[in-house]
Each structure stands twice: as structure tokens, then as C-alpha cells.
Amino acid sequence: MLKVLGSQRKLCAGVTRRDSLQIGGLGCLGLSLADYLSWQERAAAQPANFQRSFGQAKACILLLPYGSPPQHETFDPKPEAPEEVRGEFHPTATSLTGVQICDGLPKIAGIMDRLTVIRSMTHPYPLHCTAYVTSGIPDYTPALETRPRDRRHWPYVGSVVDYVLERRAGGVSRFPRNIALPWKMNSRGGEAASVQAGPYAAFLGPAYDPVLTDFTDAATREVIKQRPYGTEHRVLDPYVGIRPESRFGITGVRLDKTTTLDRFNRRRNLVDQFSAMRRELESKAAVQSFDRHRQMAYSLLASSQIQAALDVQAEPAQLRDAYGMNLFGQSCLLARRMIEAGSKFMTVFWDEYAYLNCDWDTHWNQNHRLKGWLLPGFDMAFAALIRDLETRGMLDETLVIWMSEHGRTPRFNKEAGRDHWSRVYSIALAGGGVVPGQVIGQSDKMGGDVLEHPVSPKDILATIFHLLGIDPLSTVPNQVGQPMPIAGTGVIRPEIFGGA
């Protein structure tokens, strides 16, 4: 763990001068003294020996449906609630005795005995706060949503994993540890879209941003995307259907067809010679960031392993069909291939496409979307991913998480949709040390508040780090070298992996 050097002299309330320097550094980016002391108290109360599960996950696949699914129509149906709360869907039995989920997810119902579902996620920000739920940043404002490079942001969980593992290994990996697909989040949402904060390395530097894949092939199925005031848009949407021949690439990385690998390596050697001289003249920090970009670019250009991993066409047609011949399904399959090839942290976005608020951000006409493509696509891909990992003997060492920014309101609005709601929502986890076949927490009868066992997204981050073999009490340096806790105020939740 990184520390700020200084005197150990005690101050008021038993805080050392070194601690006060740390607290001061944290406070300038939003972590208050009360937060810090609460974090220390909760961390000290954790059982000391979690060695059985520490590092059991060798890799993680994080599935992020931007916009946020409704808890009622996924993992927490409320059949006894009034119609304006329960909606049109019904609960269905699952492979986990006594547990029901939405009947729009029949394939996931068949794998519930492999999952841990948390029905009591909660936090204070009903915003599109991907950056809040996937980083240690202690608080959030709407202004931060559309400022991915704002200096107040903290690094994305995948970027922290990459940073820590690089320091353990002593260098840049030949295969990217931290990859996001199918493209930069919010980059295909139409003219009104703005790239949202979240999957960026913040003060670790842009060299630790996820390596992005790209997908540019045309979609094969048209859907009607409805917006308020009766507007309708017919859209060919890749999340509904793509061609089997569709291919993924790596953003910004292409080797000219006339350039042989030998010629490429000669060019690389010449660039390295110039770089050696340049390093004597330029600042160390800037050069380190540039060098990491350059090393990663060389690796991506020269590696046949990466090109082979990107080739989802190499998979049997039956397996590809099981995932779903759509962008989310094939992205989940690609994530599994990337983990096999050596990646450590894969992020799969189910992103907005063509128009804002027309996918998982179900402010209007929710059931049309859920029935048409959202629930079927999620059901196929998630169930196929879990079964595929299990069949290959990879599930025990691969942590899989389905998690969004928040949930949706208990009651439908006048546009037949549900609005943002963060007071309670559900997520699902599997593999990588997670105890299979359990439901943690409970919402009230309306699905609007936590009834018991509240869990913070920061606690999920701490638990992810723990399962990946990274001490969640570790810190990383911010822009001025102050140590920032990688999971913010989060603490390990041993009930997820059977540690308590």
C-alpha cells in the first residue's frame, strides 16, 4: 500500500500527522474526514483472514447496461404490488428453490443456482453515474456526468487493476489487461449524445484507459425507437441483430497492408533510438505516459494473438447462436475469448445507439423495449456466458458481474416508463469465488427501498479487488502523489464469497 511519508505524532482523536496529510489529500477530491474515519472503522472490523477467496478470480468480466435496467422486470419482481408497480410481466420459478425472477428471463432462470443476486444495492445518486459506481470517487454531481476528463474523477476499476498488476509484473503486458467493448461508451448515441464519464483512468493517466475495440458493421434488424411526444424512429440496431460475418477491431490500431512485420520491427528499433535520446530531455512523467502508449501500440500491432482472439468467427455457429447473433451477445463471447487469451479485466457495454434514452434508459414505453430486444438479448447472452465459462472450466476463476448505475422507479410514469431510482436496485454476480445460488438483501414490497442488508457499489468494488487478489485497502497516487483508496469508502462483503 502506498503511504504519505511523515511523522507518526498523534493528533486529536488519535489521528497521526501522516493520517492527517492523507485525509487532507482525500478531502480535496471529496472524501471527508467523517468518510475517512468511517472507512477506517469499517475496515478494521473486517475479519482478517480471507485468504481462501483472496485472488481466486484470475480475471473479471463486467457487463454494464448503460441507462439501467428496472429491478422489477429483472431480478426483483413484485407480484403482490399494485399494477402500476408490478407492470405487465410475471414472476417465474428458477433453478434456485423458492426464488423467482421476471418471466422475461427464462434462460437466466435456469442458471440462478450459479448466481448470487443482490436485491439491496443502494446509493444517493439517481444519475447516469457510471463513474460513481465503477470508481472510488466518494460523491457525485450531474456536472461530472459529461466531463470524463474532469480532474475530480477517480480511476475506473479496470484501470486500477491494470495499474496494480503492471507494477507487480514490472512492465506493460504483451496482451492488454484492461479492454472495453464494443466501442467507447456513449459514442454512438446520435447527434445529441455526449461521451459520459466512467471507464477512464483519471489521475492514473490516459495510458491506463481501457483499450477499446471497434465495431463498424451494419445491423440486420430494424426496431422502432420511441421517444416522448409520440416521436418514432426506425433504426437498424446492432444490439438487435448483426451478420455472422461481422468483425471487431482495435480502435486506432492498424498496420498498413504493405508493411511487413520485419519492416515494422526495423521502424520500431529506429523509434526506440530516438526515444532514448528524448528521455534525457523531457520530463519523466510525460515520457512514461507516452512510452506506455507506444509500447501498447507496438504490442497491439505486432501480436497475432490479439488478432486471433478478436476472431469470433472461429467459434462454432451453435455456440455463437446461443449467445445471440447481436452486438451484446457477440461482445460477451468476445470477452470470454479475450480472457482466455490473457486479458484480466473485460468491460462489455450495452450502450445507447442512434438516439438517447432509447435503450435501457426506459423513461418511456418501457415494455415495448423490454419485450422487443432488451430482455431477450440479456437473457441469451448472460446465460450463455455463464454456461460457456462453466463448460470450459473457467467459471471458478472468472468473476462475472451484471451491474448498472442505478435502478428504476417503483411506479410507472405517464409515458409508460420508469425513471431513475438509486434507493434500491439489483445486480448479479457469478464465478471467481462468488458463492453460487444465493440472494442477498431484500427490497420492500414496492421495490422502492432497501428492507434489509444495504450494499453500496463501493462495497462491490472492494469485493472485486479482493477476489482479484488486490488488497482493497490499497491506495494509488493522484495527480500530486497523494494516496487515494482504490475502493473509496467501500469494504469487502464476505457474504458474497462465503467469508462470513
Image (cartoon, rainbow, N blue to C red):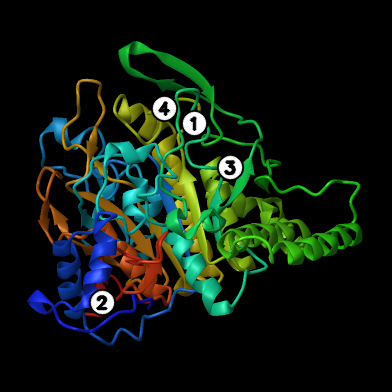
Q: Nearer the viewer, residue 263 or 91?
A: 263
Quadrant position of the C terminus in the picture:
bottom left
> Can you tell which mark lies on residue 18?
2
Q: Residues within 10 Å of mark 4 (few under 14, many from 20)?
A: many
> Can you tell which mark lies on residue 436?
none
Q: Give the Cα separation between the discs numbered 3 and 2.
A: 55 Å
The mark nearer the N terminus, 1 or 2, is 2
Q: Which mark lies nearer to you, 2 or 4?
A: 2
What residue sits 32% from the left and 44% below the top? 129
Q: Is residue 437 left or right of residue 264?
A: left
* Residue 54, horizontal then vertical, whole percent: 38, 80
For numbered disc 2, what is the local secondary structure? helix
Q: Give the Cα separation between the discs numbered 1 and 2.
A: 48 Å
* Residue 329, horizontal then vertical, whole percent: 53, 47
Q: Which mark lies nearer to you, 1 or 2?
A: 2
Mark 4 lies on residue: 356
Kindly indicate whether the residue at mark 1 contacts the one at mark 4 (C-beta within 8 angstroms).
no
Kind of residue indicated by mark 4: Leu
Does the image show residue 433?
A: no
Kind of residue indicated by mark 3: Met
Mark 3 lies on residue: 325
